[in-house]
Image (cartoon, rainbow, N blue to C red):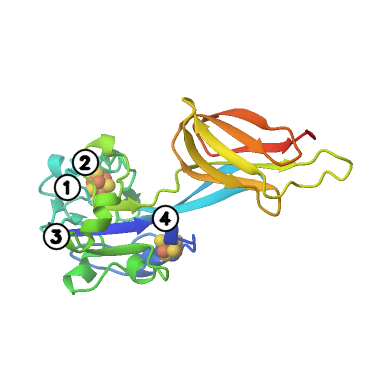
Amino acid sequence: MGKVFVFDHSYCNGCYGCQIACKDEHCGNDWMPYQKPQPELGHFWCKMVEQVHGQVPKVRMDYMPIMCQQCDACPLVEKHPDVVTKRADGLVTIDPVKSEGMKELVDECPYGAVYWNDELNIPQKCDGCAHLVDAGEIPHCVELCATEALKFGDEEEFADEIAKAEVLHPEYGTKPRVYYLNDPKLFIAGSVYDPGPQEEVIIGAKIVLEDASGKVIDETTSDDLGDYWFNKVEPGDYKVTMQAEGFATKTVEVKLDKSLNIGDFALDKA
Ligand code: SF4
Ligand code: SF4
């Protein structure tokens, strides 16, 4: 048992507050014995990653902070037990004095979470603001997250969230302590319109999503713009059928391995 970070995609608005908070806490501040100051440029111990899903005009942005995952099986701890420490509360710290000159630590983290400080000649990374945690406080990135997308606390307190969450790259086998909830998954989006002279959108068309075996996965209707969306779809092969009164039914096959805007479809008059 120990401390964990829990990040919920559905609450994050991409404000970059957590990334800025990390800079605010560590640039120009010496938190020895845990940390020497973070350089103002080039280091993102808490790094916001933006991903664009879909294709214009049907796109969605997704944001998530990536930091040291405070792994229980951190290879740096295993290789350099005198320099990198797994604390009893789960946080992983690099000794800023003993690690001098050890540039190899940067490459030994599979998450790319360790940065090289050229000026001080040391490797550095997020330690969960160990200096604040020791004082009974929470990491500064969590404190400044206004939407509570990023949380920190005892593993027991977050048991329900952890049971539903995912970790980044479980295949690395490092047993991370940062949990990610509500991964937006993939979507299929499209729209329908009447190809008549006005080319008006079709509102309220019935749209059915079936898997390759013909099993209905989801149903929706086109909105006031003729648009429709199927969210949280697993990768695979699908059929999308578009039906509207007075129009011929149209079916398209979709191979889904990334979020897709499958396009605008003209439904011919029946
Ligand atoms: S993210 Fe990298 S440095 Fe941090 S605990 Fe995991 S393996 Fe170690
Ligand atoms: S501070 Fe919170 S809401 Fe803002 S980017 Fe970070 S996790 Fe998202």
Q: Where residue 268 sits: x, y (%)? A: 78, 33
Secondary structure under tag 3 reads loop
- Say above or below: 46 vs 238: below
What amino acid does circle 4 point to?
A: His
> Which residue is drawn at the image coordinates 50% and 41% (left, top)?
218
Residue 72: mark = 1
Secondary structure under tag 4 reads helix
Ligand 1 within 8 Å of the CB at mark 1: no
- Hey, which quadrant is residue 119 in on the image? bottom left
Point out the tag, 3 or 1, that comes first from the N-terminus.
1
- For the residue pair 83 and 133, the one nearer the viewer reads as 133
Ligand 1 within 8 Å of the CB at mark 3: no
What amino acid does circle 1 point to?
A: Asp
Q: Quadrant of the N terminus?
A: bottom left
Residue 89: mark = 3
Ligand 1 within 8 Å of the CB at mark 2: yes
The residue carrying mark 2 is 174
Residue 9: mark = 4
Residue 69 appears in the rendering: no
> Which residue is drawn at the image coordinates 21% and 48% (left, top)?
71
Point out the tag, 4 or 3, that comes first from the N-terminus.
4
CA gap, disc 1 and disc 4 = 23 Å
Secondary structure under tag 2 reads loop
